[in-house]
Image (spheres, helix red, strand yellow):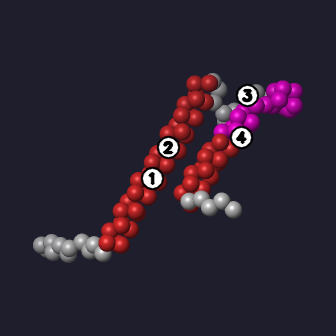
């Protein structure tokens, strides 16, 4: 069995979920013609949840991409902070007590 760091597994899991959601959104948007004639008869009542044109769809994917990138950056920064705190703990550094005037 291959040993991997937990962070690497989290990154791969997030990537898999992101790709899975993208492919499912494309599958939902595709409707086979003639499969359900009741939808054609009720066009006034029918609401499509997927964006109508390519610009809106691209905007949604770009937004989701930025969200995932910001999540990865946040995880990276938090890992750096935890590593620094662990390093200071191993060195035995205790911050001095600061007596603030009350």
Indicate which disc, 2 or 1, sits on the residue closer to the N terminus.
Answer: 2
Q: Is residue 32 left or right of residue 6?
A: right
* Quadrant the N terminus occupies: bottom right
Task: From the top left corner, tell me how far across and down residue 72 is, in percent.
Answer: 49, 49
**Mark 4 to mark 3 CA distance (whole Å):** 26 Å
**Mark 3 to mark 2 CA distance (whole Å):** 39 Å
- The residue indicated by pointer 4 is 24
Q: Is residue 75 left or right of residue 24?
A: left
Label 3: few (<14), some (14–19) or many (≥20) C-alpha neighbours in 10 Å: few
Question: Which residue shows up at 63% across the image and 30% down it?
Answer: 51
The residue tagged with tag 1: helix, strand or loop?
A: helix
Q: Is residue 35 visible?
A: yes
Q: Which mark is residue 44?
A: 3
The residue tagged with tag 4: helix, strand or loop?
A: helix
Above or below for 100 versus 41: below
Asked whether the residues under the numbered discs 4 and 3 touch, taking CB atoms below 8 Å apart as contact, a structural biologist would say: no
**Closer to viewer: mark 3 or mark 2:** 2
Q: Is residue 21 left or right of residue 95?
A: right
Q: Main secondary structure of the magenta part?
A: helix
Indicate which disc, 4 or 1, sits on the residue closer to the N terminus.
Answer: 4
Label 4: few (<14), some (14–19) or many (≥20) C-alpha neighbours in 10 Å: few
**Closer to viewer: mark 2 or mark 1:** 1
Task: From the top left corner, tell me how far across and down residue 3 is, in percent.
Answer: 62, 61
Q: Which residues are magenta?
A: 21-41
Q: Is residue 89 left or right of residue 63?
A: left
Asked whether the residues under the numbered discs 4 and 2 touch, taking CB atoms below 8 Å apart as contact, a structural biologist would say: no
- The residue indicated by pointer 1 is 76
Task: From the top left corner, tell me how far across and down residue 21 is, in percent.
Answer: 66, 43
The residue tagged with tag 3: helix, strand or loop?
A: loop
- The residue indicated by pointer 2 is 69
Q: Which mark is residue 64?
A: none
């Amino acid at each position: 069995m291959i040993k991997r760091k937990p962070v690497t597994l989290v990154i791969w899991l997030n990537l898999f979920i992101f790709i899975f959601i993208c492919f499912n959104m494309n599958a939902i948007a595709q409707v086979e013609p003639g499969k359900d004639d009741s939808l054609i008869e009720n066009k006034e009542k029918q609401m499509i949840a997927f964006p109508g044109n390519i610009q809106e769809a691209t905007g949604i994917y770009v937004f989701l991409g930025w969200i995932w990138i910001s999540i990865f950056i946040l995880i990276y920064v938090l890992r750096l902070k935890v590593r620094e705190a662990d390093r200071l703990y191993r060195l035995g550094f205790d911050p001095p007590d600061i007596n603030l005037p009350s």
